[in-house]
Amino acid sequence: MSDVVIEIEGAKRHYTTPAGVVKALDGVDLTVERGEFLAIAGPSGSGKSTLLNLIGALDTPTEGSVKIDGTSLSEMREKALAELRRDRIGFVFQAYNLIPVLSVLENVEYVMLLQGKGASERHKAAKEILAEVGLSDMLDRRPVELSGGQQQRVAVARAIAAKPSLVLADEPTANLDSATGIALLEMMQSLNKTYNMTFVFSTHDQEVMARATRLIRLRDGKIESEERRG
Amino acid sequence: MIIKLAWRNIWRNKRRTILTALTLTIGVVALSMMLTLAAGMVERMIRVATHSRIGDAQIHAAHYLETQDETLTIPSTTALLEQARKLPDVKDATARSIGIGVLSIADRTSGIQLLGIDPEHEKNITNWSERIVDGEYISEPGQVMMGSHLAEKLEVEVGSKMILTAANVTTGETTAELVRVKGLLYTGDVATDRQAAIVHLDMAQKMMGTRGQAHEIVLKLNIPIEQREPIEAIIAPLKRDGISVEPWQTMNPIVAQMKGLMESYMDVMVVVLFMILAFGLINTISMSLLERMREFGVMRSLGTSGSMLAKLIVTEAAFLGFIGAVPGIVCGLLISQLLVTYGLDFAGTTAYGMEFREPIYGQLDIPGTVRVAVMFVILTTLVSLFTAIRAARLEPVEAMRGG
Ligand SMILES: Nc1ncnc2c1ncn2[C@@H]1O[C@H](COP(=O)(O)OP(=O)(O)OP(=O)(O)O)[C@@H](O)[C@H]1O
Ligand SMILES: [Mg+2]
């Protein structure tokens, strides 16, 4: 039981629009165990982002429940949710992940700063991670001074710097060329192995899917198929 | 960290920040100048009122002020005068006799207010000795001094001989005396300039039959006189039955209320001016925040709480306020200093029975300017509060989508 990180039961997310109800997610059950490297695939509009947002407590399901480490998100207050995101979850979005007024180093330190960690501890951890993603010589640059791939690497570094138990990544490689994408993915894989961090990410990319320990395919807000690998 | 983030955030769009701050700066400068002028105006009004006639405090027989009854002279004038001069913080005191009379020359006649003064002590009370526009200040009986207005009306000049007629206050018997026009003056007090014939106290008392008894004792103090209370404290020992001892505020309540009136007027101006500025502010602040909704969503996803985000937004607005207000204080006071040094010319304007013949010199109102600036900072912060609360309440995913 202690190995279950995410537990989703009958999750629905419906949007009411002038054109009618959009069923972005329409009854998803999913259990993710610690240390998984889980890929979510599916055509555009199938609900991948919606699902990740529900897991990350960025959004609330219309129906059903989402539990992280055994606690139902619907029972948590705004403050507790903020702390959950801060302490246990790392996010990587498709683009525009970084806080523009902060340098690379400051962006990576941001979460630890929120956690109230001391300056030297923050510096050390952030520099280590940035070295791992190969950005040691860009610590003082602002996000606008980086390429898209470099920005994504900073985003990954930031997501994992505070050693969260769960990293959620919404198409982290979509904006990158395939070589850069693979490098990023390999980095995520090694972190997954080293720290036993759970990774859940959405992707369109076959190569990326091939590296997952489990692959879930969504279609029209439902889980269409599921395969376990390795 | 909020401070660092806020500070960097406001400099993201330098032009917009500077333009927005500039509107605040201009607002503070404008209000600072208005405050300076208003303070100068009030100070001038008080000074004109006290220097040109009423002094800082006055003593009369009881009921004299209401009735203007000439038989109501101050009992034991001399003793009271001496006591007053000995009081701490009393610069000097002088006695005046006031009655009515007629001044005539050839076929021209004018009813006048006969004002008997003690020339030496009067010099310490009013500005009349400095306000001689022609001739000299009077020094002995047989001389008369009058406003240039009155002189023009009677077509007399310095050196003219005139007949002064006045009635004995008890018997009603009239006496006429020959007087020589010694000086023409301009005091700024309309009543004095248009109606008074100023003669030596001895002469006035002889004609009115009130030897040794004055109608009015006027005091000049060594303290700031804007406030009533300190004056009351100094003159309190003079109070006794049968006489009234009052600060200048009683004699000229309109000018006395001026300061308070100006202050409430300025408060209204601050709010009005800010409301005009607020339209621009609300627009820029909410626009720049809307553009950043995605960024707020990212921050929320990293575990930034809604309240911290709100604090950040409010801090940014407060910084913006400061960036506008602090130069506003500095520039406002510097420009106001010009008004203090060079004054503003209102020549020929009459207000509340006093003429402003000289330019109004401003008086720096530093606390007032700072208060205005602080109000601007607070109001700017309040404006941002609405957007801040909205951004804080938004679900992170909604923010990510752009609000
Ligand atoms: N705020 C919203 N209002 C209405 N419909 C929405 C909203 N957000 C998402 N949707 C709809 O929900 C469905 C799922 O969206 P979602 O973003 O999860 O898809 P996705 O699988 O991530 O697609 P993509 O691969 O293009 O990123 C889509 O049909 C989308 O149009
Ligand atoms: Mg998506």
Image (tube, coloured by chain):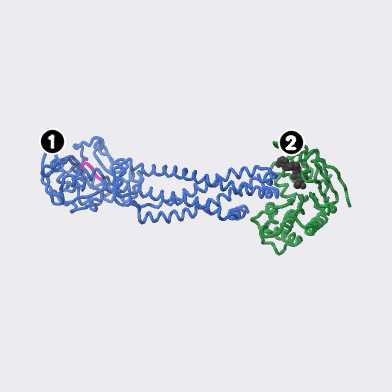
Q: Amino acid at mark 2?
A: Val
Q: Amino acid at mark 1?
A: Gly
Q: Chain of mark 2?
A: A
In the rendered image, residue B135, in percent from the top left (x then y), is placed at 18, 53
Residue sitting at 35 percent across and 54 percent down?
Answer: B343
Numbered range of the magenta stretch: B214-218
The quarter of the image holding the N terminus of chain A is top right
Q: Chain of mark 1?
A: B
Residue sitting at 29 percent across and 50 percent down?
Answer: B357
Whether the residue under disc 1 has CB within 8 Å of ligand 1: no
The residue pinned by badge 2 equals A21
Residue A2 visible in this rendered orientation of the protein: no
Chain B: its colour in the image is blue
In the rendered image, residue A14, in percent from the top left (x then y), is placed at 74, 38
Residue sitting at 46 percent across and 53 percent down?
Answer: B329
Quarter-wise, where is residue B352 in the image? top left
Q: Is residue B215 magenta?
A: yes
Q: Is residue B5 magenta?
A: no
Label 2 to label 1: alpha-carbon separation:
105 Å
In the rendered image, residue B93, in percent from the top left (x then y), is placed at 25, 48
